[in-house]
């Protein structure tokens, strides 16, 4: 495969990296004279390997709100089809989610990335519910929390993640509520706001049967 063919396979988020690299290549003569003994082909090969690994493993996947929403919608669809039992997705459901996510965003990831995202959603949902499960809460018309700066300053001490939802509603809260409203979240019991988000994160794990069943 030549360099052009390889680039055609890259998702959009990697193109900026490659564009910068080819700008480097365009000026390689000047660069090579300032870096004696550097093998340009070797550097390009390293780039190919690094980007290829990120494509295969999804290790650099940063979820946008839109990507998260699609994933949650797909999980709800597979649940209605009977492909999810006790929050464990069977092989048919996994492949459907992976395929439809790729069709929409052009990114193909191993199931472990989707499983980890579900675990992250459980953490976010639990933190959000503990943040809002208080008396005297007030909300803006768009659903975001309408409380004083002093109130927020105290919440930041309890849960740093609260900063992300100070000026906007919790992203995809409606879908999380549908999916996680009655879920048993291992490790959340006994958590208090004073323990902070790190305590919640350290103890929020997949149930053992779920982790074993979704280990690929």
Image (tube, helix red, strand yellow):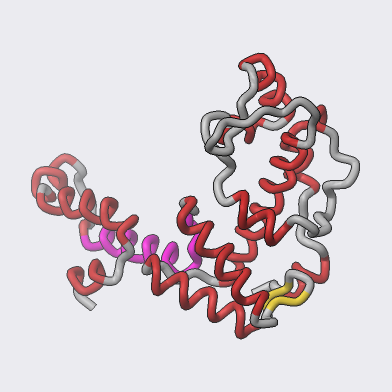
Judge left or right: residue 128 versus residue 46: right
**Camera-nearest residue between 1 and 101:** 101
Judge left or right: residue 116 versus residue 130: left
Q: At x 59% / y 77%, what residue is drawn?
A: 94
Whether 189 is among the magenta residues is no
Q: At x 39% / y 69%, what residue is drawn?
A: 104
Whether 45 is among the magenta residues is yes
Judge left or right: residue 112 versus residue 126: left
Residue lying furthest top: 150
Coordinates of residue 92 in the picture (x, y in percent): 61, 85
Which residues make up the magenta segment? 41-62
Quadrant housing the C terminus: bottom right
Based on the displayed image, in which of its 4 quarters is residue 77 positioned? Answer: bottom right
**Camera-nearest residue between 123 and 2:** 123
Judge left or right: residue 120 versus residue 24: right
Q: At x 57% / y 31%, what residue is drawn?
A: 140
Coordinates of residue 197 in the picture (x, y in percent): 72, 36
Q: At x 85% / y 39%, what residue is drawn?
A: 191
Residue lying furthest front: 141
């Amino acid at each position: 495969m030549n360099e052009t063919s390889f680039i055609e396979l890259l998702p959009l988020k990697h193109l900026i990296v490659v564009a910068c690299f080819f700008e480097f290549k365009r000026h390689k003569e000047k660069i090579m004279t300032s870096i004696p003994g550097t093998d340009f082909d070797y550097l390009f090969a390293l780039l190919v390997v690094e980007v290829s690994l990120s494509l295969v493993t999804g290790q650099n996947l940063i979820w946008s709100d839109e990507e998260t929403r699609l994933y949650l919608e797909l999980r709800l669809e597979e649940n209605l089809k009977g492909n999810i039992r006790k929050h464990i997705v069977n092989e048919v459901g996994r492949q459907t989610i992976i395929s439809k996510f790729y069709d929409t965003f052009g990114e193909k990831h191993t199931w472990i990335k989707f499983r980890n995202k579900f675990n992250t959603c459980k953490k976010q949902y639990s933190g959000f519910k503990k943040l809002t499960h208080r008396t005297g809460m007030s909300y803006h018309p768009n659903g975001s929390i309408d409380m004083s700066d002093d109130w927020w300053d105290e919440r930041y001490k309890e849960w740093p993640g609260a900063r992300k939802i100070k000026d906007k509603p919790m992203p995809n809260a409606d879908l999380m509520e549908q999916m996680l409203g009655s879920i048993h979240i291992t490790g959340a019991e006994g958590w208090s706001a004073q323990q902070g988000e790190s305590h919640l994160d350290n103890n929020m794990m997949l149930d053992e049967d779920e982790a074993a069943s979704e280990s690929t």
